[in-house]
Image (cartoon, grey):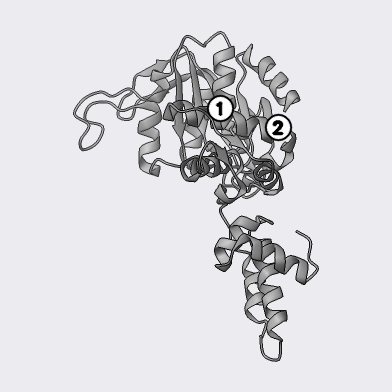
Amino acid sequence: MGRLMDQARRVSQNELTTLITGESGTGKTTIAKWIHCLGPRAAHPFVTVNCASLPRDLIEAELFGHAQGAFTGAVADRPGRVEAADGGTLLLDEIGDMPIELQPKLLTFLQDQSFQRIGSDRRHRVNVRVIAATNQNLAEHCQAKSFREDLYFRLNVLALRVPPLRERRDLLAELAHQIILGISARAEEPPPRIEEEAMFALMRHPWPGNVRELENVLERACVFRRGNVISAADLAFDVFPPPADEQDNSASRSLAGRTMADIERQALVDTLEACRGNKAMASRQLGISERSIYNKLKRYQLSY
């Protein structure tokens, strides 16, 4: 992360197109905003276009605007996000979902910063810094012919990779503290303390949803905590189902001929695995007390 921050500082001081990659929820938009705020365009607009959230037939109009009468309902000229970002930074979020038919027009814009509104022959020119972000492998998309190679090379001038949360666990405690400070500030209340066992549970979780998932877990914990302390029992992690092949294997295991103790032991192991070792969460799912979890672990000589 230190290297990433150093790279971002260097990137902020020039005008080259930048591509930020990383899994969903890692904070790519935050890095893009940070680059904008550190650079010479900080006093100008920071405009985001999410290429995945807009319908395919609206992305072009949203980006470049339209002229009066260009289509039904176009009762007046309307500038797009590109013009709104003039002088500042344009973030093309989820660029991997940009429709292939619109990519040539985006490529032309990146080359000379000029464009035409839909339904107009007049060319407009702007001055924007372009940052693109994606959680997809654009090189693979190029091989699959779903993303243009020339556009990929135009975007990938400066490349930054934001690591997933599981690769930066050394920063998790500080990150959790900062998130809680933000939550408490919005609620106008003192920030709660995280118990050692709760922090251990946070450190063990694999965080498939990255920082966004951490924010959700801590938001829930702040709501359901008792007093001004967050305990392990207050942490409710999102449990993702296992892959289909694992589900098939687990469904095929027969209980016939197995002792009740063996069945109980297996239920305990499977639940703890699904809960990433969180005993408070496992106790809620099994409908028993947390003390019973520890007693059964001792009885079956299990360590979690």
Instruction: Give the quarter of the image for residue 298.
Output: bottom right
The residue that disc 1 covers is 30
- Identify which residue, 231 or 149, lies in the foreground: 231
Say whether residue 184 is visible: yes
Q: Determine contact: label 2, label 1, CB under 8 Å.
A: no
> Residue at image x 70%, y 62%?
294
Q: Position of residue 185 (x, y in %)?
A: 47, 25
**Is residue 118 placed above or below 140 in the rendered structure?**
above
* N-term-proximal mark, 2 vs 1: 1
Badge 1 marks a residue whose secondary structure is helix
Q: CA distance from mark 2 to mark 1?
A: 16 Å
The residue that disc 2 covers is 171
151 left or right, relative to 113: right
Q: Mark 2 is on which residue type? A: Leu
- Identify which residue, 115 or 176, lies in the foreground: 176
> Are there few (<14), some (14-19), or many (20+) residues within 10 Å of tag 1?
few
> Are there few (<14), some (14-19), or many (20+) residues within 10 Å of tag 2?
few
Q: Position of residue 77 (x, y in %)?
A: 25, 23
Badge 2 marks a residue whose secondary structure is helix
Say whether residue 29 is visible: no
- Identify which residue, 131 or 157, lies in the foreground: 131
